[in-house]
Amino acid sequence: MTKVLIFLKFPSLLFEKLFLSSFRMFGFLAIAIGFLCIFYASKIGDFVGEISFAEKYLGPGRTYDFIKYVGLGLIIIGFLWLVGDLDVILRNIFGKILFLPQ
C-alpha cells in the first residue's frame, strides 16, 4: 500500500520541484509568452493595431517586428531568470545608480 502511495505522490512532487517553484515558474512563463509573441506576431499585431512609436522609429509596417522583438526580449529575460543571472545583471547595471550593495 505504501509503495502505491509513494508512486502516486512522486510525480506530483517532481512536478512541484521542477515547475511550481516561484523562481522557475516566472522564467518558464516568460519564455512561453515570448515564443507565443514570436509565433503569433501577425495575429497579435492585427488585434493590437498599429503601434505608433514602432512605426515612427523602426519604419512603416514594423509593428510586427516590434512584437517579435518584445517576444525575443521576454525569452532572454526568462532564460536569465531561470539561470539566476538576471539579479546579477540588474544589480551591476542599476546598483551604482540606486546605491545598492554589490
Image (cartoon, rainbow, N blue to C red):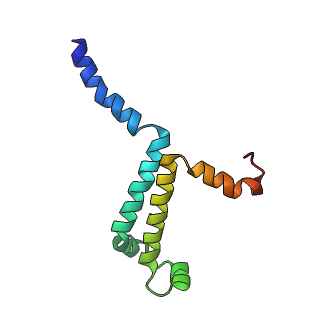
Residue at far bottom of view: 60
Residue at far right of view: 99
Q: Which residue is at a point 41% across and 58% down the rendered structure image?
A: 33
- Residue 97 in percent (x, y) is at 76, 57
Residue 57 found in image quarter: bottom right
Q: Which residue is at a point 68% across and 54% down the rendered structure image?
A: 92
Q: Which residue is at a point 42% across and 55% down the rendered structure image?
A: 31
Residue 30, above or below 52? above
- Report whether 92 appears left or right of 72: right
- Residue 5 in percent (x, y) is at 26, 18
Q: In which quarter of the image is the N terminus?
A: top left
The total of numbered circles placed on residues is 0
- Residue 4 in percent (x, y) is at 21, 18
Residue 99, above or below 40? above
Residue 9 found in image quarter: top left
Q: Which residue is at a point 40% across and 33% down the rendered structure image?
A: 17
Front-most of residues 85 and 73:
85
- Residue 26 in percent (x, y) is at 47, 47
Front-most of residues 54 and 69:
69
